[in-house]
Image: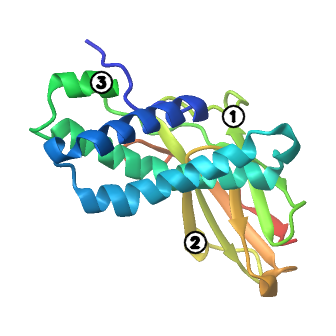
Amino acid sequence: MATTKNIPETDAAFLEKSKAVTAYIAVNNERLKVDNIFFTQTIQPAQTRWETKYAAYLPIETRTPLATAEKNNAKNDYMPLFRELVGGVLRNPNVTDDDLAAMELNRPDSIHTPAPVPSTWPVVLTDLNTPNSVILHFTDSASGKRAKPHKVSGAVVRYAILAAPPTDMDELNNSVLDTQTPCLLTFPEAQRGNRLYYCLAWQNTRGEKGPWSRIEMAIVP
C-alpha cells in the first residue's frame, strides 16, 4: 500500500509540515531524544533562514527574481536537512505511532519502486537583469513545464568562468543541485563581464543523472 508523502514539495505545504514537525520535537524532545545539537544548531537556523526568505518573497511588491531565487536557495539548503531529520525520526525507537500521527508522518513502505534514470533534460531561460547574478529559469524538455519529471530530485547545474568555450564537460568544474527553478548563481565584482559557461541535467532521487542540456554562455552582468 502506498504511503502518503512525508515531505511535500510546494512551498506553503512544506512550510506547514516543517513547522509542525519541528514544533512537536521542540516540545517533546526530552522523551524523543532527537540529536539536540543537530536540531538546535543545524535544523533551526536553516529553518529560520528559509522562513525569512519565504516571508520576504510572499508580498507581490517584493517578488523580484532575486527574492525568488533567494527563497529557493534557502529551501534547497534546508530541504535535505529536514529530510535527514524526518528520516531520523522514522528510525527513532523512542518515537511512537502516536508521535508520528501528531506530526502527520508515515513510516515508509517496505517495497519501493526504483526511480528511473531521467530521459529528458532542463531547458534554460537566462535572466541577466541582476548585477553579479545569473538566474537560470528551467523547464522540462518534454513537457515544457516547470514541474520536475517523476522521481527527479532537481536539476544539476555545472558551470565555470572560462576565457574560451569548453571542449570537455570536466572544464565545468563547479556544480550545484537546485530542487526548484530558478537557480541563482552569484559572482564577485571582479568576475563581472566574464564569460560563464553552463549546462544542466535532471538528477533522480538515487543520484543518477539524465542527459545534459547543451552548453550555454552568458556574460556575468
Q: Point out which mark residue 102 bears.
A: 3
Question: Can residue 108 be seen in the rendering of this structure?
Answer: no
Q: Which residue type does callout 3 highlight? A: Ala
Which of discs 1 and 3 lies nearer the camera? The answer is 3
Which mark, residue 174?
2
Question: From what the image shows, is residue 130 above or below residue 119?
Answer: below
Please tell me in which quadrant of the rendered image residue 188 appears: bottom right
Q: Looking at the picture, how far across and down is residue 12, in whole percent? A: 59, 31
Left or right? Give the position of 147 relative to 2. Answer: right
Secondary structure beneath label 3: helix
Q: Give percent across and percent down for residue 27.
A: 29, 41
Q: How many labels does the image show?
A: 3
Q: Please provide percent x and percent y for residue 143.
A: 68, 27
Dot 1: what SS?
loop
Residue 42 picture quarter: bottom left
Q: Quadrant of the N terminus?
A: top left
- Residue density around tag 1, few if under 14, some if 14–19, many if 20 or more, within 10 Å: some
Task: Say which label, 1 or 2, has the lower sequence index.
Answer: 1
- Above or below for 156 versus 17: below
Q: Which of 198 and 72 is in front in this view?
A: 72
Residue type highlighted by circle 1: Arg
